[in-house]
Protein backbone atom coordinates (compact mmCIF):
# COMPACT_ATOMS: atom_id res chain seq x y z
CA UNK A 1 0.00 0.00 0.00
CA UNK A 2 1.42 3.25 -0.96
CA UNK A 3 2.20 5.54 1.86
CA UNK A 4 0.34 8.89 2.24
CA UNK A 5 2.14 11.93 0.95
CA UNK A 6 3.59 14.12 3.64
CA UNK A 7 1.40 17.12 4.60
CA UNK A 8 2.62 20.50 3.39
CA UNK A 9 3.74 22.94 5.98
CA UNK A 10 3.18 26.76 5.83
CA UNK A 11 6.75 27.18 4.77
CA UNK A 12 6.15 24.83 1.86
CA UNK A 13 3.16 26.81 0.56
CA UNK A 14 4.65 30.28 1.06
CA UNK A 15 6.19 31.10 -2.33
CA UNK A 16 7.81 34.25 -0.98
CA UNK A 17 9.87 32.13 1.34
CA UNK A 18 10.30 29.27 -1.15
CA UNK A 19 10.99 30.83 -4.50
CA UNK A 20 11.80 27.48 -6.02
CA UNK A 21 8.16 26.36 -5.68
CA UNK A 22 6.33 27.59 -8.83
CA UNK A 23 2.55 27.14 -9.05
CA UNK A 24 1.75 27.03 -12.77
CA UNK A 25 -1.68 26.89 -14.39
CA UNK A 26 -2.62 23.57 -15.91
CA UNK A 27 -2.18 23.31 -19.69
CA UNK A 28 -5.34 23.96 -21.78
CA UNK A 29 -6.49 20.91 -23.76
CA UNK A 30 -6.30 21.25 -27.58
CA UNK A 31 -10.05 20.77 -27.94
CA UNK A 32 -10.71 23.78 -25.68
CA UNK A 33 -8.37 25.98 -27.76
CA UNK A 34 -10.22 25.07 -30.94
CA UNK A 35 -13.63 25.80 -29.40
CA UNK A 36 -12.51 29.30 -28.33
CA UNK A 37 -11.20 30.12 -31.83
CA UNK A 38 -14.52 28.99 -33.33
CA UNK A 39 -16.33 31.26 -30.88
CA UNK A 40 -14.38 34.32 -32.11
CA UNK A 41 -14.97 33.40 -35.75
CA UNK A 42 -18.72 33.05 -35.19
CA UNK A 43 -18.88 36.48 -33.49
CA UNK A 44 -16.97 38.11 -36.37
CA UNK A 45 -19.25 36.58 -39.00
CA UNK A 46 -22.38 37.61 -37.09
CA UNK A 47 -21.15 41.20 -36.76
CA UNK A 48 -20.36 41.39 -40.49
CA UNK A 49 -23.78 40.05 -41.51
CA UNK A 50 -25.70 42.32 -39.15
CA UNK A 51 -23.78 45.51 -40.12
CA UNK A 52 -25.40 46.30 -43.46
CA UNK A 53 -26.12 50.02 -42.98
CA UNK A 54 -23.81 52.51 -44.82
CA UNK A 55 -21.20 54.00 -42.58
CA UNK A 56 -21.34 51.11 -40.12
CA UNK A 57 -17.72 50.05 -40.47
CA UNK A 58 -16.45 53.62 -41.22
CA UNK A 59 -19.01 55.88 -39.55
CA UNK A 60 -19.33 59.38 -40.99
CA UNK A 61 -18.79 62.43 -38.82
CA UNK A 62 -22.05 64.10 -37.86
CA UNK A 63 -22.75 67.12 -40.04
CA UNK A 64 -23.31 70.52 -38.49
CA UNK A 65 -26.82 71.87 -38.92
CA UNK A 66 -27.03 74.40 -41.79
CA UNK A 67 -28.89 77.58 -40.98
CA UNK A 68 -31.27 79.11 -43.48
CA UNK A 69 -29.32 82.39 -43.52
CA UNK A 70 -25.97 80.76 -44.38
CA UNK A 71 -27.27 79.41 -47.70
CA UNK A 72 -28.37 82.88 -48.75
CA UNK A 73 -24.99 84.52 -48.10
CA UNK A 74 -23.34 85.61 -51.33
CA UNK A 75 -19.65 84.91 -51.92
CA UNK A 76 -17.10 87.33 -50.54
CA UNK A 77 -14.97 89.20 -53.05
CA UNK A 78 -11.43 90.08 -51.93
CA UNK A 79 -10.03 93.57 -52.15
CA UNK A 80 -8.69 94.36 -55.61
CA UNK A 81 -5.16 93.10 -56.12
CA UNK A 82 -2.46 95.70 -55.46
CA UNK A 83 -0.86 94.86 -58.80
CA UNK A 84 -4.08 95.67 -60.62
CA UNK A 85 -4.81 99.04 -59.03
CA UNK A 86 -3.13 100.93 -61.87
CA UNK A 87 -4.53 100.45 -65.36
CA UNK A 88 -1.78 101.74 -67.67
CA UNK A 89 -2.41 103.79 -70.78
CA UNK A 90 -4.17 101.60 -73.33
CA UNK A 91 -2.58 100.49 -76.58
CA UNK A 92 -5.98 99.52 -77.98
CA UNK A 93 -7.00 102.09 -80.66
CA UNK A 94 -10.54 102.12 -79.22
CA UNK A 95 -9.31 103.30 -75.82
CA UNK A 96 -5.95 104.96 -76.52
CA UNK A 97 -7.32 108.36 -75.44
CA UNK A 98 -7.51 107.09 -71.85
CA UNK A 99 -4.27 107.60 -69.99
CA UNK A 100 -3.31 105.95 -66.71
CA UNK A 101 -6.27 105.11 -64.44
CA UNK A 102 -6.33 104.04 -60.80
CA UNK A 103 -9.11 101.69 -59.69
CA UNK A 104 -9.83 100.23 -56.26
CA UNK A 105 -12.65 98.54 -54.39
CA UNK A 106 -12.94 97.21 -50.82
CA UNK A 107 -13.57 93.61 -49.86
CA UNK A 108 -17.29 93.03 -50.21
CA UNK A 109 -20.11 90.48 -50.26
CA UNK A 110 -22.61 90.52 -53.11
CA UNK A 111 -22.58 93.29 -55.71
CA UNK A 112 -20.97 96.71 -55.59
CA UNK A 113 -23.73 99.31 -55.61
CA UNK A 114 -21.87 102.44 -56.70
CA UNK A 115 -19.17 103.73 -58.99
CA UNK A 116 -17.24 106.70 -57.61
CA UNK A 117 -15.19 108.72 -60.09
CA UNK A 118 -12.81 111.37 -58.78
CA UNK A 119 -11.39 114.11 -61.01
CA UNK A 120 -8.27 115.59 -59.48
CA UNK A 121 -7.36 119.28 -59.72
CA UNK A 122 -5.11 121.30 -62.00
CA UNK A 123 -1.35 121.45 -61.75
CA UNK A 124 -0.43 124.12 -64.24
CA UNK A 125 2.98 124.37 -65.77
CA UNK A 126 4.88 127.33 -64.34
CA UNK A 127 4.64 130.48 -66.47
CA UNK A 128 7.72 132.07 -68.07
CA UNK A 129 7.44 135.03 -65.68
CA UNK A 130 7.66 132.77 -62.65
CA UNK A 131 10.52 130.84 -64.21
CA UNK A 132 12.49 134.09 -64.68
CA UNK A 133 11.82 135.15 -61.08
CA UNK A 134 12.86 131.71 -59.89
CA UNK A 135 16.11 132.03 -61.91
CA UNK A 136 16.89 135.53 -60.57
CA UNK A 137 16.30 134.42 -56.99
CA UNK A 138 18.37 131.31 -57.60
CA UNK A 139 15.63 128.99 -56.40
CA UNK A 140 16.59 126.30 -58.85
CA UNK A 141 14.38 124.62 -61.45
CA UNK A 142 10.63 124.39 -61.02
CA UNK A 143 9.34 121.20 -59.38
CA UNK A 144 7.96 118.64 -61.83
CA UNK A 145 4.24 118.69 -62.45
CA UNK A 146 2.19 116.14 -60.58
CA UNK A 147 1.32 112.88 -62.28
CA UNK A 148 -1.68 110.69 -61.54
CA UNK A 149 0.54 108.66 -59.22
CA UNK A 150 1.28 111.81 -57.22
CA UNK A 151 -2.41 112.57 -56.76
CA UNK A 152 -3.18 108.97 -55.77
CA UNK A 153 -0.37 108.75 -53.22
CA UNK A 154 -0.04 112.32 -51.85
CA UNK A 155 -3.78 112.76 -51.41
CA UNK A 156 -3.97 109.25 -49.89
CA UNK A 157 -7.04 108.49 -51.97
CA UNK A 158 -7.15 104.75 -51.33
CA UNK A 159 -7.13 105.41 -47.57
CA UNK A 160 -9.93 107.98 -47.88
CA UNK A 161 -12.07 105.61 -49.95
CA UNK A 162 -11.49 102.81 -47.46
CA UNK A 163 -12.46 104.98 -44.46
CA UNK A 164 -15.79 105.85 -46.07
CA UNK A 165 -16.94 102.22 -45.95
CA UNK A 166 -18.89 102.70 -49.20
CA UNK A 167 -19.30 99.49 -51.27
CA UNK A 168 -18.15 101.03 -54.53
CA UNK A 169 -15.73 100.72 -57.41
CA UNK A 170 -13.51 103.79 -57.04
CA UNK A 171 -11.98 105.18 -60.23
CA UNK A 172 -9.42 107.99 -60.55
CA UNK A 173 -8.61 108.78 -64.19
CA UNK A 174 -5.86 111.03 -65.44
CA UNK A 175 -7.66 114.38 -65.51
CA UNK A 176 -6.70 117.55 -67.33
CA UNK A 177 -4.01 119.43 -65.38
CA UNK A 178 -4.83 122.68 -67.16
CA UNK A 179 -7.16 123.99 -69.82
CA UNK A 180 -4.96 122.79 -72.69
CA UNK A 181 -5.01 119.08 -71.76
CA UNK A 182 -7.80 116.74 -72.95
CA UNK A 183 -10.70 115.87 -70.64
CA UNK A 184 -12.34 112.50 -70.12
CA UNK A 185 -15.72 113.29 -71.69
CA UNK A 186 -16.94 110.01 -73.24
CA UNK A 187 -18.52 108.39 -70.18
CA UNK A 188 -19.97 105.38 -72.02
CA UNK A 189 -16.70 104.47 -73.71
CA UNK A 190 -14.73 105.12 -70.53
CA UNK A 191 -16.85 102.80 -68.35
CA UNK A 192 -16.84 100.17 -71.07
CA UNK A 193 -13.04 100.23 -70.89
CA UNK A 194 -13.09 99.95 -67.08
CA UNK A 195 -15.40 96.96 -67.30
CA UNK A 196 -13.10 95.31 -69.83
CA UNK A 197 -10.10 95.76 -67.53
CA UNK A 198 -11.68 94.91 -64.17
CA UNK A 199 -14.36 92.39 -65.13
CA UNK A 200 -16.88 94.34 -63.02
CA UNK A 201 -20.19 95.32 -64.58
CA UNK A 202 -20.37 99.12 -64.81
CA UNK A 203 -23.77 99.39 -66.48
CA UNK A 204 -25.95 98.58 -63.44
CA UNK A 205 -24.49 100.92 -60.81
CA UNK A 206 -25.22 104.43 -59.58
CA UNK A 207 -22.47 106.90 -60.38
CA UNK A 208 -21.10 109.42 -57.90
CA UNK A 209 -18.90 112.15 -59.36
CA UNK A 210 -16.39 113.97 -57.16
CA UNK A 211 -14.19 116.81 -58.37
CA UNK A 212 -11.68 119.05 -56.72
CA UNK A 213 -10.53 122.42 -58.02
CA UNK A 214 -10.00 122.43 -61.79
CA UNK A 215 -11.24 118.84 -62.03
CA UNK A 216 -14.72 120.34 -61.95
CA UNK A 217 -14.37 121.39 -65.59
CA UNK A 218 -14.80 117.72 -66.65
CA UNK A 219 -18.01 117.10 -64.66
CA UNK A 220 -20.50 118.96 -66.96
CA UNK A 221 -19.73 116.48 -69.75
CA UNK A 222 -21.05 113.62 -67.58
CA UNK A 223 -24.24 115.15 -66.15
CA UNK A 224 -26.63 113.87 -68.83
CA UNK A 225 -25.93 110.20 -68.10
CA UNK A 226 -28.96 108.79 -66.21
CA UNK A 227 -26.71 106.74 -63.92
CA UNK A 228 -25.20 109.89 -62.38
CA UNK A 229 -27.09 110.33 -59.10
CA UNK A 230 -24.84 112.48 -56.90
CA UNK A 231 -22.30 115.16 -57.82
CA UNK A 232 -19.85 116.45 -55.21
CA UNK A 233 -17.93 119.60 -56.15
CA UNK A 234 -15.20 120.35 -53.62
CA UNK A 235 -14.34 123.99 -54.27
CA UNK A 236 -14.49 123.20 -57.99
CA UNK A 237 -16.87 125.84 -59.39
CA UNK A 238 -15.19 127.66 -62.27
CA UNK A 239 -17.59 129.07 -64.85
CA UNK A 240 -19.84 126.00 -65.08
CA UNK A 241 -22.80 127.41 -63.15
CA UNK A 242 -25.34 127.01 -65.98
CA UNK A 243 -24.77 123.24 -66.16
CA UNK A 244 -25.41 122.74 -62.47
CA UNK A 245 -28.38 125.07 -62.48
CA UNK A 246 -29.96 122.92 -65.18
CA UNK A 247 -29.09 119.72 -63.30
CA UNK A 248 -30.88 120.86 -60.13
CA UNK A 249 -33.96 122.04 -62.02
CA UNK A 250 -34.33 119.21 -64.54
CA UNK A 251 -32.70 116.06 -63.14
CA UNK A 252 -35.25 114.98 -60.56
CA UNK A 253 -33.52 111.91 -59.10
CA UNK A 254 -30.15 113.50 -58.38
CA UNK A 255 -28.41 115.58 -55.74
CA UNK A 256 -25.78 118.30 -56.03
CA UNK A 257 -23.41 118.81 -53.09
CA UNK A 258 -21.04 121.77 -53.26
CA UNK A 259 -18.30 122.24 -50.67
CA UNK A 260 -17.06 125.80 -50.36
CA UNK A 261 -14.14 127.31 -48.47
CA UNK A 262 -14.27 130.62 -46.57
CA UNK A 263 -12.70 132.29 -49.62
CA UNK A 264 -15.32 130.96 -52.07
CA UNK A 265 -18.55 131.19 -50.02
CA UNK A 266 -19.88 134.08 -52.10
CA UNK A 267 -19.83 132.53 -55.58
CA UNK A 268 -21.27 129.26 -54.30
CA UNK A 269 -24.09 131.06 -52.49
CA UNK A 270 -24.86 133.09 -55.62
CA UNK A 271 -25.54 129.85 -57.49
CA UNK A 272 -27.13 127.73 -54.79
CA UNK A 273 -29.33 130.13 -52.78
CA UNK A 274 -31.73 130.87 -55.68
CA UNK A 275 -32.05 127.09 -56.19
CA UNK A 276 -33.26 126.61 -52.63
CA UNK A 277 -30.16 124.70 -51.54
CA UNK A 278 -29.87 123.43 -47.98
CA UNK A 279 -27.08 125.33 -46.18
CA UNK A 280 -25.02 123.21 -43.80
CA UNK A 281 -21.85 123.68 -41.81
CA UNK A 282 -21.70 119.95 -41.03
CA UNK A 283 -23.20 116.95 -42.75
CA UNK A 284 -25.81 115.34 -40.46
CA UNK A 285 -25.21 111.78 -39.36
CA UNK A 286 -27.65 108.91 -38.94
CA UNK A 287 -27.83 108.64 -35.16
CA UNK A 288 -30.10 105.63 -34.66
CA UNK A 289 -28.65 102.15 -34.53
CA UNK A 290 -31.32 100.69 -36.80
CA UNK A 291 -30.53 99.86 -40.42
CA UNK A 292 -31.42 102.67 -42.78
CA UNK A 293 -34.40 100.88 -44.36
CA UNK A 294 -35.96 100.21 -40.93
CA UNK A 295 -35.39 103.76 -39.79
CA UNK A 296 -36.75 105.32 -42.97
CA UNK A 297 -39.89 103.16 -42.83
CA UNK A 298 -40.39 103.67 -39.09
CA UNK A 299 -41.14 107.38 -39.25
CA UNK A 300 -41.98 107.62 -35.57
CA UNK A 301 -38.53 106.63 -34.39
CA UNK A 302 -36.78 108.82 -36.95
CA UNK A 303 -38.85 111.85 -35.92
CA UNK A 304 -38.07 111.31 -32.24
CA UNK A 305 -34.39 111.97 -32.86
CA UNK A 306 -33.71 115.51 -34.15
CA UNK A 307 -30.41 114.41 -35.65
CA UNK A 308 -32.14 111.77 -37.75
CA UNK A 309 -34.75 114.28 -38.86
CA UNK A 310 -31.99 116.57 -40.15
CA UNK A 311 -30.34 113.61 -41.85
CA UNK A 312 -33.40 112.65 -43.89
CA UNK A 313 -34.08 116.28 -44.68
CA UNK A 314 -30.59 116.46 -46.20
CA UNK A 315 -31.18 113.25 -48.16
CA UNK A 316 -34.31 114.74 -49.76
CA UNK A 317 -32.63 118.04 -50.71
CA UNK A 318 -31.93 118.65 -54.38
CA UNK A 319 -28.86 120.74 -53.59
CA UNK A 320 -26.64 121.20 -50.53
CA UNK A 321 -24.19 123.99 -49.83
CA UNK A 322 -21.68 122.55 -47.37
CA UNK A 323 -19.77 125.44 -45.86
CA UNK A 324 -16.67 123.58 -44.84
CA UNK A 325 -13.89 124.79 -42.53
CA UNK A 326 -11.12 123.75 -44.93
CA UNK A 327 -8.88 125.67 -47.31
CA UNK A 328 -8.66 125.05 -51.03
CA UNK A 329 -5.30 123.29 -50.73
CA UNK A 330 -2.35 122.95 -48.37
CA UNK A 331 -2.22 121.29 -44.97
CA UNK A 332 -5.80 122.32 -44.18
CA UNK A 333 -6.99 121.61 -47.70
CA UNK A 334 -10.30 119.88 -48.48
CA UNK A 335 -8.59 116.79 -49.87
CA UNK A 336 -5.51 116.66 -47.66
CA UNK A 337 -7.34 116.73 -44.30
CA UNK A 338 -8.99 113.39 -45.20
CA UNK A 339 -12.30 114.48 -43.67
CA UNK A 340 -14.62 115.77 -46.40
CA UNK A 341 -14.52 112.82 -48.80
CA UNK A 342 -15.02 110.03 -46.22
CA UNK A 343 -17.85 111.98 -44.59
CA UNK A 344 -19.74 112.75 -47.78
CA UNK A 345 -19.37 109.20 -49.13
CA UNK A 346 -20.58 107.72 -45.84
CA UNK A 347 -23.57 110.08 -45.92
CA UNK A 348 -24.44 109.08 -49.50
CA UNK A 349 -24.26 105.40 -48.61
CA UNK A 350 -26.66 105.84 -45.66
CA UNK A 351 -29.31 107.83 -47.53
CA UNK A 352 -32.31 105.63 -48.52
Image: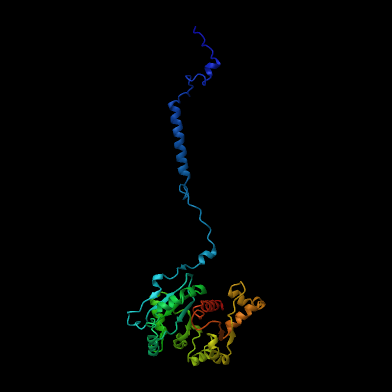
* Numbered-mark total: 0
Q: Which residue is painted at 50% across and 93% down in the image? A: 242
The quadrant holding residue 195 is bottom left
Q: 190 or 102: which is nearer to us?
A: 102
Residue 143, image x, y percentages: 39, 81
Q: Which residue is painted at 47% across and 67% down in the image? A: 76
Residue 8, image x, y percentages: 53, 14
Q: 134 or 50: which is nearer to us?
A: 134
Q: 192 or 348: which is nearer to us?
A: 348
Q: 15 or 172: which is nearer to us?
A: 172
Residue 26 higher or lower than 113, as above or below: above
Q: Which residue is painted at 61% across and 77% down in the image? A: 296
Q: Which residue is painted at 46% across and 28% down in the image? A: 32
Residue 159, image x, y percentages: 48, 73
Q: Is residue 242 visible?
A: yes
Residue 309, image x, y percentages: 63, 80
Quarter of the image with the C terminus in it: bottom right
Q: Is residue 201 visible?
A: no
Amino acid sequence: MPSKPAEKTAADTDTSQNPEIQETAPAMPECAKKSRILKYLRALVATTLLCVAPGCINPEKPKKPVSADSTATLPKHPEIDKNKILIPTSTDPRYEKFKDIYVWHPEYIGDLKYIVIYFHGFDREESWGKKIIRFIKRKGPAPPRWTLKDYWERQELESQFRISGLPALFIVPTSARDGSEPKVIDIKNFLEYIQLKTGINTADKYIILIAHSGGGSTVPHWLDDPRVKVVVMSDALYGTESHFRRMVKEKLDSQLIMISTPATRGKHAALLDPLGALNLEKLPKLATNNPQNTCSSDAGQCQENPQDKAFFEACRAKAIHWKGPWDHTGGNGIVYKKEAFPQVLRYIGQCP
